[in-house]
Image (cartoon, rainbow, N blue to C red):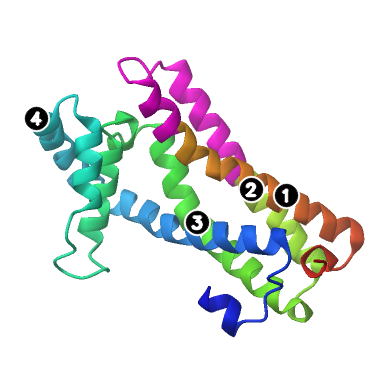
Amino acid sequence: VGCLLVIPYNARNVIVISLLFFNNLNILIAFCEIILGWHIKLIQKDYKENMENYKDRRCDCGLAYVFLPLRNGPFDSRAWSRMWSAYAMFDPSYQNHESFGFFIDVGNGWTTIPPCILWNISMAYSELFSPILVGCIGMASYWQICYGTIIYLLSYVYNKRYVGKSMMENFGFIGAMNLVWFFFPLLAMYASYRMLSDGDFRVFQSS
């Protein structure tokens, strides 16, 4: 909300508001994905402890993380890494540095922050950039995010990691959380297509 008051975004444009929300969320998660790569050994250790302490009480483990105090402040990467050891209770591939889930997320962490920042700026100050440049980068980057999500979910189903979990855990937790990184990138790819076909930024300017 503060960004809308200070930076001249078109608050009446659904695409702008939707992508501003998603880009900022993705930037936050991208930093967490970088932490996933940095602290994988710690995550593996915490995961083993979680398995001993919580066993099948996966939701309790997730809630314990949500209410975990940040004793060393919001930039404590070790505290943020515990997000992944909690998520690994639902999908153990995230404590396995040989898995697809691990590598696609760490890769997205390192590569999707600059495109999101570029798009956030171009949605407010379109005169600074070429729509062709922004559209091409957007089409490539958001397709990478969308494709990675599709393959991850297919891997989750193919390897039957849903077995032993409730419908709420599979659809309400794994499904709902990951589909954010499917539908919003689709919207961004539509905006990329509009920029490339229109040759301008009118997709961000109409109400």
Image quadrant where residue 182 sits: top right
Label 3 – label 1 distance at C-alpha: 15 Å
Classify 10 Å Cα crowding around label 4: few (below 14), some (14-19), many (20 and above). Answer: few
1 and 2 marks in contact (CB < 8 Å): yes
Image quadrant where residue 194 sits: bottom right
2 and 4 marks in contact (CB < 8 Å): no
Residue 84: assigned label: none
- State whether residue 39 appears in this view: no
Disc 2, SS: helix
Mark before the other along the chain sequence, 3 or 1 = 3
Mark before the other along the chain sequence, 3 or 4 = 3
Q: Please report the bounds of the magenta region as a residue range.
A: 145-174
Is residue 90 shown left or right of residue 47?
A: right
- At x 85%, y 67%, the residue is 202
Mark before the other along the chain sequence, 4 or 1 = 4
Q: Amino acid at mark 4?
A: Glu
Label 2 – label 3 distance at C-alpha: 11 Å
Mark before the other along the chain sequence, 2 or 4 = 4
Residue 26: assigned label: 3
Which residue position is annotated with label 1? 189
Image location of residue 112, percent across then percent down: 54, 57
Q: Magenta span: helix, strand or loop, mainly? A: helix
- State whether residue 195 appears in this view: yes
Image location of residue 145, percent across then percent down: 58, 45
Which residue position is annotated with label 4? 52
Outermost residue toward the bottom? 6
Label 2 – label 4 distance at C-alpha: 37 Å
- At x 33%, y 49%, the residue is 37
Disc 4, SS: helix
